[in-house]
Image (cartoon, rainbow, N blue to C red):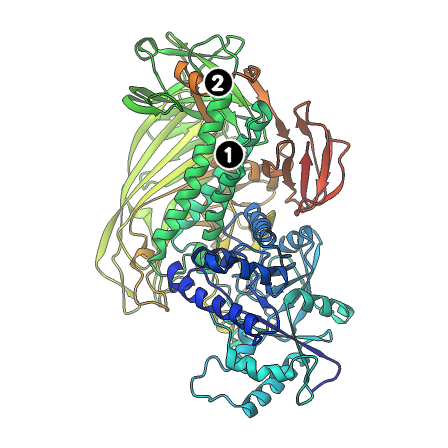
């Protein structure tokens, strides 16, 4: 045994909240595990720290059913014997937004501190499926010491390295090696063998061999012996054999210190100058076959990006509701009316969402029973956010000064100004409005033109009151298209007046199959594909929106093509085209056809029998918009397949770009993977947060697709084709017998937009447009009943237009929220490769601005709000008072 090394034993368990069992199944086991840990501390059998897998949520889950042990548990947290956090739940790092990753760390550390302890300050990512390029900057922003990583990197031969993030931040890292974070369990505790009887001699030999092999791969003197396999209890017989080796004692020339990851990080960093290996940027390398032979292979399991696609869609919708709508609206209400939303409401909404961000949960790699739990938690998050949004919007609107009895107030909750056609829906709550038509007037009595998209003659509304009987009434209801300019983080109030509106004759639909505005001309072909012309460049893109389907035997983790399978495309279908609406501000066409696909996979072949799947594609073009909005309704009636939509570029490129957490990543069309060298199927899908784009510096396409997380590109002859994954239907999950819900049968809807590019890819603009696409303006309707309920008798009446905060879109806004009664937080980032400057316009009473780290610690004062400069790839957090 080398005397140059010290040996550090860390006891943990990798706790999957949901996986091959549902939450209650795993929690039942968690109770026994943590009971044993507490009992071990109490009777002296356990003398070192128990590391809670980098998470704090297991404490909440445990104490919910063990409240009688709260004081005892928290005492162990306070003494450092149980180490919680920094995550609340260990998430996937690509499917949740970058802002959600920050909130996860923030809340995980908050929960640990509420228990009286100091949270762990290492970024523990032992089993996440690849790691984004900005993770080192996130770690630096929370002042973390070290990262502990595994998947996405093919360096099992070394344990320590520097990971350099997109902005240049460097995170010292420990990289788990042979058998991953299971190494100690496999080689010392023999957890994968049932025929090895424990003995003192066997333990001594295994410990000596494993310690020596780890020391050989360790550059600093501190060697980590990490004992934390999946869902495992504290191994008390093994620990009794280890005890004679624990400092201050030693045995057989080996002395081991039972410690925690933070203390180990300090020991390793003490002579980090011995570390000379560097990783850069995003880490998503597939596993290599040569490492499998030595049990050192890792896998990024990329099929999880499109598995149970509804999870990804609902998650993105909840993130938008919280980050981009509810939190800014609550801040707006607090500033204008002095009324703060109860912080516990936001905490409850985020807690349920973060529970769904646990990596196996958000991947959809679980047994079908968990589907209901996921839907329920999404629903709780959504309903809390919806109530906050409704209450804040109605309360502000009711206090806006107006001479009209009937108003609609439209809120832009994004920090960027918006100038676009919006959809607004409201009641015609008087006979005059319902029968005589209505006009919309701005504060200066200027009439605003609009287009009616839909009218429902009877729709019910209920308005509860604190002290009176609820109002129940039926009125006509309309949905309109309205061109409107809105300032950032603010509102505009419009009067609703009876009378015929001014008519406008021009229409966007110019032929049965053609839509055209100032920027685009779109023609629908007989097979349902599109021909799109970008008027700014004169370039035309053909065969857009063709569907492509292949068989898939890969299960939850991989897309794995069938042998001798060939893609089935929708190019030969016969489509019917119908107009949905047509007017001066919005026109929509519906494309309907039947797509016949093999019914299932039998013996690794797609069946000869086919089943018709109904496809309905709605394309919408709005006045003066450079985007074509698309909604695909797909009635999935077949199994074991992977459905994507194609976007041929008409030119060849070697690379394309996708956005990820706080970054934009350039990806190779052909990454150069060789199937024979990999121990997992060749990755054919790659992550995006909300958009992908490709350009030849003269022209190109971007696809804005919030909620759809998997994209790809392929060379098709002399042209490159972009692909957006819609769904994967696959039942196989090796840990359970059957998972029929993972086939995602039935109705599915996918929404995105096509946006041509002239020149280079405009990263910040695409971030802003993707946010705008996902974040609809909020409307509050005001009449006598609303004013009675919501108008404050103490607040001064509000102006008809207002902006609290506006940021020019050279950078991206990640969050704006109230932190306290007087403090607000604004987070910006620059995903481009160049320094960007932005102007920051604040309401005049907001004066003090401090830059902070991600943990909220002040860095310095911001003196020039008119020209705020962000270095390349930088994340900047501001506290505003």
Q: Which residue: 26% across, 60% down? A: 600
Query: Residue 105 location in percent, x, y?
Result: 59, 52
Q: Is residue 88 above or below residue 512?
A: below
Q: Nearer the viewer, residue 426 or 110?
A: 110
For label 1, count other residues whose C-alpha is less than 10 Å away and answer few (under 14), some (14-19) or many (20+). Answer: many
Q: Which residue: 45% across, 67% down? A: 681
From the image, tell me which residue sits under label 1. Answer: 325
Query: Residue 12 location in percent, x, y?
Result: 55, 69
Q: Is residue 623 visible?
A: no
Q: Is residue 231 above or below residue 758?
A: below
Query: Residue 111 location in percent, x, y?
Result: 56, 52
- Quadrant housing the N terminus: bottom right
Q: Residue furthest bottom?
A: 201
Q: Which residue: 33% across, 58% down? A: 368
Q: Hey, which quadrant is residue 257 in on the image?
A: bottom right
Quick check: 526 left or right of 95? left
Dot 1: element? helix
Q: Is residue 339 visible?
A: yes
Quick check: 241 left or right of 835? left
From the image, tell me which residue sits under label 2. Answer: 791
Q: Distance between the residues labelled 2 and 1?
A: 22 Å
Dot 2: element? loop
Q: Which of marks 2 and 1 is nearer the N terminus?
A: 1
Q: Which residue: 40% across, 59% down? A: 23
Q: Nearer the viewer, residue 379 or 692?
A: 379
For label 2, count other residues whose C-alpha is less than 10 Å away and answer few (under 14), some (14-19) or many (20+). Answer: some
Q: Which of marks 2 and 1 is in front?
A: 2
- Quadrant housing the C terminus: top right
Q: Nearer the viewer, residue 425 or 118?
A: 118
Q: Nearer the viewer, residue 526 or 8?
A: 8
């Amino acid at each position: 045994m080398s005397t140059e090394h010290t040996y550090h034993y860390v006891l943990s368990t990798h706790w999957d909240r949901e996986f091959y069992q549902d939450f209650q199944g795993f929690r039942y086991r968690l109770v026994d595990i943590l009971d044993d840990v507490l009992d071990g501390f109490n009777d002296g059998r356990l003398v070192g720290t128990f590391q809670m897998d980098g998470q704090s949520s297991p404490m909440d889950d445990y104490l919910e059913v063990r409240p009688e042990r709260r004081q005892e548990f928290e005492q162990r947290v306070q003494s450092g014997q149980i180490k919680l956090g920094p995550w609340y739940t260990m998430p996937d790092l690509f499917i949740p937004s970058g802002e959600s990753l920050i909130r996860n760390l923030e809340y995980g550390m908050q929960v640990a501190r509420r228990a009286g302890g100091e949270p762990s300050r290492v970024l523990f990512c032992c089993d996440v499926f690849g790691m984004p390029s900005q993770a080192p900057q996130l770690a630096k922003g929370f002042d973390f010491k070290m990262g502990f990583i595994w998947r996405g990197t093919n360096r099992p031969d070394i344990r320590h390295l520097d990971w350099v993030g997109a902005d240049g931040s460097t995170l010292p890292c420990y990289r788990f090696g042979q058998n991953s974070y299971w190494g100690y369990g496999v080689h010392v505790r023999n957890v994968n063998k049932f025929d090895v009887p424990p003995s003192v001699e066997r333990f001594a030999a295994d410990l000596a061999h494993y310690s020596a092999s780890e020391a050989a791969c360790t550059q600093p003197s501190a060697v980590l012996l990490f004992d934390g396999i999946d869902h495992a209890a504290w191994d008390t017989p093994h620990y009794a054999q280890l005890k004679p080796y624990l400092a201050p004692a030693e045995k057989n020339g080996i002395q081991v210190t039972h410690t925690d990851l933070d203390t180990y990080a300090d020991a390793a960093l003490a002579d980090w100058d011995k570390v000379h290996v560097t990783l850069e940027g995003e880490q998503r390398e597939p596993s290599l076959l040569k490492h499998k032979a030595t049990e050192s292979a890792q896998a990024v399991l990329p099929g999880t990006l499109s598995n149970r696609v509804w999870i990804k869609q609902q998650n993105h919708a909840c993130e938008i509701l919280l980050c981009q709508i509810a939190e800014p609206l609550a801040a707006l209400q607090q500033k204008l009316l002095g009324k703060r939303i109860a912080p516990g409401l936001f905490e409850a909404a985020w807690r349920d969402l973060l529970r769904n961000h646990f990596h196996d949960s958000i991947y959809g790699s679980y047994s079908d029973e968990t589907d209901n739990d996921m839907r329920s938690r999404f629903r709780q998050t959504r309903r809390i956010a919806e109530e906050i949004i409704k209450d804040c919007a109605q309360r502000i609107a009711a206090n806006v000064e107006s001479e009209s009895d009937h108003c609609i107030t439209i809120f832009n909750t994004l920090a960027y100004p918006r100038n676009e056609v919006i959809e607004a829906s409201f009641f015609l709550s008087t006979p005059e409005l319902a029968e005589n038509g209505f006009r919309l007037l701005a504060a200066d009595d200027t009439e605003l033109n609009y287009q009616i998209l839909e009218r429902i003659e009877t729709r019910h509304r209920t308005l509860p009151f604190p002290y009176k009987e609820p109002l129940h009434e039926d009125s006509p209801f309309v949905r309109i298209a309205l061109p409107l300019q809105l300032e950032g983080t603010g509102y505009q109030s419009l009067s609703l007046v009876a009378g015929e509106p001014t008519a406008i004759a021009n229409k966007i639909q110019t032929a049965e199959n053609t839509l055209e505005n100032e920027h685009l001309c779109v023609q629908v072909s007989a097979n349902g594909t599109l021909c799109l012309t970008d008027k700014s460049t004169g370039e035309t893109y053909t065969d857009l929106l063709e569907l492509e389907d292949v068989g898939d035997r890969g299960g939850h983790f991989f897309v794995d093509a069938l042998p001798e399978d060939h893609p089935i495309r929708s190019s030969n279908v016969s489509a019917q085209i119908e107009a949905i609406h047509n007017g001066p501000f919005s026109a929509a066409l519906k494309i309907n056809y039947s797509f016949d696909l093999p019914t299932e996979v039998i013996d690794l072949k797609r069946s000869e029998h086919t089943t018709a799947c109904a496809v309905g594609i709605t394309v919408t073009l709005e006045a003066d918009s450079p985007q074509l909005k698309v909604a695909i309704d797909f009635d999935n009636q077949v199994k074991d397949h992977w459905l994507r939509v194609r976007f041929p570029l008409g030119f060849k490129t070697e690379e394309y770009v996708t956005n990820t957490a706080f970054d934009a990543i350039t990806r190779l069309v052909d990454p150069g993977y060789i199937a024979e060298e990999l121990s997992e199927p060749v990755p054919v899908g790659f992550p995006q947060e909300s958009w992908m784009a490709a350009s030849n510096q003269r022209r190109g396409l971007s696809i804005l697709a919030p909620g759809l997380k998997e994209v790809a590109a392929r060379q098709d002859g002399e042209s490159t084709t972009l692909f957006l994954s819609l769904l994967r239907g696959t039942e196989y999950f090796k840990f359970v017998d059957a998972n029929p819900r993972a086939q995602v049968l039935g109705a599915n809807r996918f929404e995105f937009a096509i946006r041509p590019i002239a020149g280079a890819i405009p990263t910040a603009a695409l971030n802003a447009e993707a946010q705008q696409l996902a974040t609809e303006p909020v409307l509050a309707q005001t009449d006598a009943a609303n004013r009675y309920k919501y108008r404050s008798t103490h607040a001064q009446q509000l102006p008809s237009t207002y902006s609290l905060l506006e940021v020019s879109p050279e950078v991206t806004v990640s969050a704006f929220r109230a932190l306290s009664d007087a403090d607000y937080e604004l987070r910006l980032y620059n995903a481009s490769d160049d320094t960007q400057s932005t102007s920051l316009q604040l309401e005049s009473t907001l004066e003090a601005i401090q830059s902070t780290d991600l943990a909220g610690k002040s860095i310095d004062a911001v003196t020039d709000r008119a020209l705020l400069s962000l270095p390349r790839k930088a994340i900047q957090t501001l506290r505003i008072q």
